[in-house]
Amino acid sequence: MTTSHSTNEAPYELIYWHVIPGRGEHIRLCFVEAGVPYSDTAFTEGGMDVLHAYISDTNTGDELNPPPFAPPILKHGDLVISQTPNILQYLGPKLGLAANGGDDIFRINALALTALDGLSNEVHNCHHPIAIDLYYEDQKEECLRRVKDWVKNRLPKYLGYFERVLSGKASKDGPWLYGGVLTWADLVLFQTLDGTSYFFRKAVAAAKNSGKYGRVFQHYEAVKARPRIAEYLASDRRQKYSNYGVYRYYEELDLVAEE
Amino acid sequence: MTTSHSTNEAPYELIYWHVIPGRGEHIRLCFVEAGVPYSDTAFTEGGMDVLHAYISDTNTGDELNPPPFAPPILKHGDLVISQTPNILQYLGPKLGLAANGGDDIFRINALALTALDGLSNEVHNCHHPIAIDLYYEDQKEECLRRVKDWVKNRLPKYLGYFERVLSGKASKDGPWLYGGVLTWADLVLFQTLDGTSYFFRKAVAAAKNSGKYGRVFQHYEAVKARPRIAEYLASDRRQKYSNYGVYRYYEELDLVAEE
């Protein structure tokens, strides 16, 4: 039986789609902030063949690793894992993005999961409420109905939640979400709000102008101004949002909340 | 500044809604299988007041813990954490449900997250595709459209995935998903398939009869036959599914896949 080798010396390999930032972007931002090198199938010749082999219906994994359901996938030595929040939680302590470590990783993970639920998964379902297998154009009416509710009820709920987190004692007076230091949850909140702002430009602008979520928007700017993040965002490595990914732009869905 | 005390001696306190099994049930099943006692607001006088205080719009958490967004919530000594997969990952190693521990917790967590995505969150969205704030009755047409696609495309995709996991080398010839031992991912797959079978009785029966997912249905029976699980399922502590929860029954949505 094979046993797991130390993975500490192994290279980090990200397996993710090309063309879109998507969920893989959360993992990229962790490496960028930490200044740690990684490979990325989005920019590697033959990268999509590697990806498709991992998620093939015939892949049953190996001795140590079950097959992944979907990308993003991280390979680190013998370890092959999938699921965005899971990969982030694995990397957080290794990249120095986990506050004091120990039980803090569960406090941070809860924040990251909540941002992903609200400002990524729920946003994705705003352009695919009926079926992920159908085109947006085949569910446009349902999208419009969903978006009207989402910008009115759900967007303020999540922004209000993170405003409360940032005002709480465990954040240690900000600007970061937890423990007075930047963690992977900060990078997740930044990226999910960035994508949500691309999709719902009018609703997010209205939320910003309302003054109700001052800490959340300061937090966004604080992450964006981190030197390595700022350099990355200005580079070619930062892929553009497009209508293949989680965060899209459809003018007819760019609505503000109705009274 | 307060520092985190050892929580190993502290009681486990589950904070969750009463009346429905819901997402809290995944956490209960871990305690049950491990034979470890815990308290549960679903069965405690004043339990819902405790729950509402945690998720109140005015709760900003404490020195160590950000406020939770939603239940389930676990309190263990100084630690207060939320998000189902996060709580499960915290408990798994402590309750002896994490195979060899170490990096295995990330392999197991990926399986648990996938079962929760597919057979819990996607199923929930079958009765709330448009808005969680609206009643089912106000989005019935959209539900019907979503369900027709879901039973045709998504149910077989997830069942096929777990069949592959169970046939892979990392499962060590079954009946368990990973490493030849029962882990928290097994309990999650059991509970999500149990709930999905309640919602989509015809589609799951058809999948079972197809013979394509033999390992998945054997896995389900193997979990159900664990002595402590079997005793729990037969007891009053196992709450019934109802139309307030993730897993519901609407006759008009109980469809099989159309060719």
Image (spheres, coloured by chain):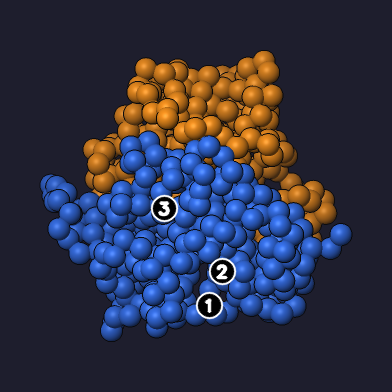
Chain colours: A orange, B blue
Left or right: residue B72 versus residue B37 is right
Residue picked out by circle 2: B195
As drawn, the label of residue B182 is 3
Label 1: how many Cα within 10 Å (few below 14, some 14–19, many 20+): some
**Element type at marker 2?**
helix
Contact between marks 2 and 1 (CB within 8 A): the answer is yes
Q: Which residue is more in the foreground, B187 or A237? A: B187
Along the viewing direction, whichever of A152 and A72 lies nearer the viewer:
A72
Residue A55 image-quadrant placement = top right
Using the rendered image of the protein, determine whether residue B109 is visible from the camera's viewpoint. Answer: yes
Residue found 17% across the figure and 60% down from its top: B10
On whether disc 3 and disc 2 are found on a single subunit, the reply is yes
Residue at (45, 59) in percent of width and height: B187
The part of the image, by quadrant, that contains residue B41 is: bottom left
Task: Indicate the position of residue B110 as horizontal and vertical percent values.
Answer: 49, 44
Residue with the mark numbered 1: B241
Q: Nearer the viewer, mark 3 or mark 2?
A: 3
Q: Residue at (66%, 29%) from the top-left corner?
A: A53
Residue A221: where, in percent of width, then height? 44, 36
In the rendered image, the vertical position of residue B67 relative to residue A251, given as above or below? below
Q: Earlier in the sequence, mark 1 or mark 3?
A: 3
- Left/right placement of residue B26 relative to residue B131 reads left
**Between residues B14 and B106, which one lies in front from this camera angle?**
B106
Could you tell me the amino acid type at mark 1? Tyr
**Which badge, 2 or 1, comes first in the chain's sequence?**
2
Q: How many marks?
A: 3
Give the residue type that dot 2 points to.
Gly
Q: Chain of mark 3?
A: B
